[in-house]
């Protein structure tokens, strides 16, 4: 728990505020609560205690960032690099990504800490398509997703990254991915826990290994597959 600019501890006040809104959600119904949770969620960033996941908000988003506030990138100048062990490295602008075939599907989002959000509509470019265009070399075995937060990364085997439901997501709920959800562009890794879905995506690097990423090197399973 931190302190606000006036020096007052924020932890207790934030938790009590969330409890109040959680109760409001119960009496006013799911639609209002969904709206509230999107408005509310930025204050739930940086929750090293995991305490907010115990608050009875229902099935709503927690907006995570292991690095605190992330400097937003403008959609007009955003670029995504696909490089590493490939024959054809390239840099995509958002408009380049938009011009590629888009896959749309709806899926439940599961964080490994227990919360989930049902029926999230995603639209994006399959990582498999970007890898095919890049043409991995024969010694390529893994993929590392990099974030422009400067810290977060995710490992995957080449096969996992090529799964049908692993996308560079451009849209969420039919709208451009918001900054708090990792826009302009984030990964959505269907069939895997949320920590596999890199926010603020800056690069897809093809590698000769499956070395652990940020959470994987802190004890989360290497593959993150949801088995249920
Ligand atoms: N760059 C970055 N990506 C990230 C994270 C993060 O802290 N930083 N957290 C991961 C975890 S643990 C989860 S559950 C989801 C949460 O996505 P959301 O913040 O859109 O709810 O993002 C994943 N991607
Ligand atoms: Mo998570």
Image (cartoon, rainbow, N blue to C red):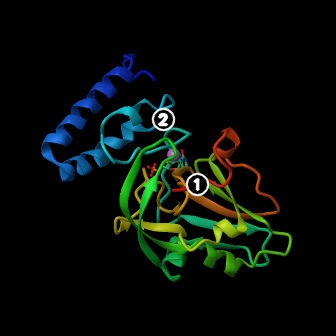
Q: Position of residue 153 (x, y in %)?
A: 65, 51
Q: Residue furthest left?
A: 28
Q: Examine the rendered structure and indicate whether residue 222 appears above or below residue 133.
A: above
Which mark identifies residue 50?
none
Callout 1 secondary element: helix
Q: Quadrant of residue 210?
A: bottom right
Q: Examine the rendered structure and indicate whether residue 190 appears above or below residue 115.
A: below
Q: Residues within 10 Å of mark 1 (few under 14, many from 20)?
A: many
| Residue 108 left/right relative to 68 | left
First in sequence: mark 2 vs mark 1: 2
Residue 10 visible from this viewpoint: no
Residue nearer the viewer, 28 or 72: 28
Q: Examine the rendered structure and indicate whether residue 174 appears above or below residue 145.
A: below
Q: Position of residue 164 (x, y in %)?
A: 56, 74
Residue displayed at 30% across by 36% down: 56
The residue that disc 1 covers is 196
Residue 11 visible from this viewpoint: yes
Tell me the quadrant of the picture where the N terminus can be found. top left
Residue displayed at 26% across by 50% down: 34
Q: Residues within 10 Å of mark 2 (few under 14, many from 20)?
A: some
Q: Examine the rendered structure and indicate whether residue 162 appears above or below residue 101.
A: above
| Residue 186 left/right relative to 87 | left
Callout 2 secondary element: loop
Q: Quadrant of residue 205?
A: bottom right
Is ligand 1 closer than 8 angstroms to the Cβ of mark 1? Answer: yes
Tag 2 near tag 1, CB within 8 Å: no
The residue that disc 2 covers is 46
Q: Position of residue 42 (x, y in %)?
A: 38, 41
Residue displayed at 53% across by 70% down: 165
Q: Position of residue 112 (x, y in %)?
A: 52, 45
Residue displayed at 77% across by 75% down: 136
Structural distance between the alpha carbons of marks 2 and 1:
18 Å
């Amino acid at each position: 728990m931190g302190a606000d600019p006036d020096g007052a501890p924020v932890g207790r006040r934030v938790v009590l505020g969330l409890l109040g809104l959680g109760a409001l959600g119960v009496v006013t119904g799911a639609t209002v609560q969904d709206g509230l949770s999107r408005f509310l969620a930025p204050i739930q960033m940086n929750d090293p205690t995991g305490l907010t996941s115990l608050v009875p908000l229902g099935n709503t988003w927690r907006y995570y960032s292991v690095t605190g506030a992330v400097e937003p990138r403008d959609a007009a100048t955003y670029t995504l690099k696909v490089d590493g062990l490939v024959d054809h490295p390239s840099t995509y602008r958002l408009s380049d990504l938009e011009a590629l075939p888009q896959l749309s599907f709806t899926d439940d989002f599961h964080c490994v800490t227990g919360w989930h959000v049902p029926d999230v509509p995603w639209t994006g470019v399959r990582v498999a398509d970007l890898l095919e265009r890049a043409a991995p070399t024969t010694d390529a075995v893994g993929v590392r997703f990099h974030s422009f937060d400067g810290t977060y990364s995710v490992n995957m085997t080449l096969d996992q990254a090529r799964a049908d439901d692993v996308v560079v997501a451009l849209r969420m709920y039919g709208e451009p991915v918001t900054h708090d959800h990792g826009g302009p562009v984030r990964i959505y890794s269907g069939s895997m826990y949320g920590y596999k879905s890199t926010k603020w995506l800056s690069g897809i690097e093809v590698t000769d290994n499956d070395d652990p990423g940020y959470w994987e090197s802190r004890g989360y399973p290497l593959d993150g597959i949801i088995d249920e």
